[in-house]
Structure formats: structure tokens, C-alpha cells
Image (cartoon, grey):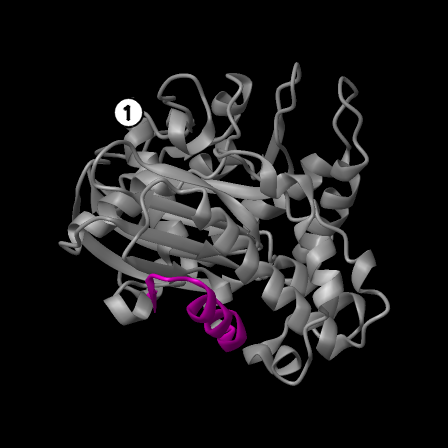
Amino acid sequence: MRVLGFMTGTSLDAVDMAVLETDGETIEAFGPAGERKLSEPVRKLVLAATDAARGWARNTPEPAVFAEASAAIAREHFEAAEAFLADNNLAWSDIDLIGMHGQTVLHERPKVGQVGRTVQLGDAAWLADQTGVPVAFDFRSADVAAGGEGAPLAPIYHLARARASDFQPPLAVLNLGGVANVTLWPGVGELVAFDTGPGNGMIDLLVQDRGAGRFDDKGNYASVGMVDEGILRALLAHPYFDAPPPKSLDRYDFSLEPLAPLKLEDAAATLVAFTAEAVKLGFQKLQTAPSVVIVCGGGRHNPEIMKALRERLKAHVQSAEDVNWRGDAIEAEAFAFLAARTSRDLPISFPQTTGATTPMKGGRIARPATPRQGA
């Protein structure tokens, strides 16, 4: 089937889109991929929803801003896809299924005696009605309700993508989004996956907090800064790094407060080192060491992060583009793939990737009120 996948990450940068022809087990063909930057009003609305989510007590009504943001996010997806399909000589009638991750505004990992919470906003029913195409969504909730982390979810796609490239294990895929996560394909045994620590999210928040832009473009601030080793050690003392995988993080689980005494350049350099050292610590928990690490996600555009990873990891570190992958589209491709698996009632998360006790099917499908003719 031909599936359009959407992804909007915690960087609040863009709606990423990619088309796959897939049955959810193998990839038959790669269709076009692209992005549209989030409009500033929607970005501000998502930030307001995120702020509300961080203060949302359990067992109380959800913040009112969630509904407003969910509607706006769905409209943003629809408008982005309308232009994207037209640019690629496609119509909604050419799409069999949509996979919409939605915008994460809250992710709390489970604790002893308490399941986690995860919220991705986006009105899937409205999108299905507008497009006339079924929409797979809400990929994380079932896993979380079953005691899993609900993240990361891309590992089963990372495996399919590696196999489509005829790669061999042991291989790791490192996604540097707002949070960094790794998938290990060991070759013998099950996939292993977990969040290693911050990706580029803390650096983005730092630059924004200092009024210096949205992100550290090309690592310009970090490249002229000095790492504060004392603050780095304090950041790495967080109990998260001692916890065994599988495990997951929210973008806001680490505070910028320890970096307050540093000038921007030194703080950025310290956070680059923090991201890379956290990945190194994560790799030390793997029973099988990968020989190759493929880096995708927005953080691979920061040369300082890539340099730090190459200095610290024993494996051969390559960017997605080095191996002819579409680095900016991997997660959108992943949710197209997961949508296809959802439609076929196949599992999308696994004990060694999210900590759920059994493979979890996850995801729901919103069907259009008026099905497309011929569908």
C-alpha cells in the first residue's frame, strides 16, 4: 500500500512528510519526502500546550488548550500535505493510508507502581474526513498503558530500512532529535532500543533562552566554546544514566540551570559534550557493540555533535546521507511504516525496545465519515 507518514518533533521546526510503498514488513519503494516549516502561530500554540501539560496533575481534566492545539496541528498537517502532494503530482486518491504521529506535548516514563503518561496532539478524525483517507494515530498509548515506555517506536522501521539497504549487523541507528535514541540490530537476539539522553533539544532551549536564535546553526556557538568539565560531570550524574534500558525521556527532563554561570558559547560546547557522552554511556550498556553507527535526525546537521560522537564512539560513525538514507525523513518514513503495521494488526513495540511485557500492536485508525469513492 502507499502510505503517507507525518512526523513533527519536539524541536517544533517542521511537519516532515514521506511516502512509502510498504506492507509494514518490507519496503517496496520510497516515494517523495519533504517538509513544511511550522507556522509561528501554531508553534506558539504548541508551546502553550506543552507548558500546560507540564503542570497537568494526574486524574484531572486535560488542559483546555489541548483541543485547540490538536485542531491547529491537524490543519497544519493537511495544508502541508496538500502542497507536498501537488508538488509531487500526487492526489489524496493516490494515498491508501496516512500515519500521523502527532505533536508530543508530554512524555513521562513509568515509575515503580505508576504507569507513564504520553500525549501526542493532532485531530486524526478531522484529518481523515478532510482527506478521505484512513489515518493511523495514537501509536504510543497502548504501550504505555501496558507498562511500557511508549518510546522509542522507530526501531522496527530502522531494522526494515537497514535490511532494504542490504546492511549487516551488528549495526546501530542513532536518532538525534530533541531527545537522542539508539536502535541496536545485534544480529543474534532481539532489537534493543532506548533513549540515550538529550539530542539537540537542550541546545535549542539554551539558545532560545539566551535570545540567540532558535538553534545553534552549524554548531557555531559550540565550536568556539570550552567544555566545563565540572558541569558536564554534574549533568552526567543524573540517575537516568544508571537505569538499565529500555528507558525513555522527555525533552524537559534535564534542566538548563547548571549552565547558567557559563557564557553561551561554553554552555553550548558543554551540552554538545553532554549529548555525546550520554550516547557513549548508553553504548556501554549494550551487550553487542555495533561496528557501524548511522546518525539521523536534526542533530546530525551540527558538526560539533558529529565530531564529538566520532571522538567518543569506537564504531564507524556515518550520517544518514553517507549511506544514501534520507536523514530528515527517517521518522516520517517510520510512521508510514508503523501505520501499515497498525492496519495489519502487527506489533509496533517490543519488550527490548520499550519494556512492555509482550510485543504490543498499538495505534488506532480513524476512518473518514465519507469514504473516498473507489476506496
Q: Secondary structure at mark 1?
A: loop
In the rendered view, tell whether residue 35 sits above or below residue 243.
Answer: below
Give how far across and how far down residue 111 sits, in percent: 65, 23
Q: Which residues are magenta?
A: 302-319
Residue 94 visible somewhere in the drawing: yes
Residue 207 at x, y = what percent?
72, 70
* Kind of residue at disc 1: Leu
Which quarter of the rendering shows the N terminus? top left
Residue at the top extreme, as displayed: 113
* Observer-nearest of 241 and 165: 241
Find disc 1 in the rendering and name its residue.
Answer: 346
Asked if residue 367 shows in the view, the reply is no
Task: Let me know if residue 316 is in the magenta part.
Answer: yes
- State left or right for residue 215 relative to residue 171: right
- Residue drawn at the location 24% of the way across and 49% of the way down: 170
Is 305 part of what is drawn in magenta? yes
- Mark 1, other Cα within 10 Å: few <14 / some 14–19 / many ≥20: some
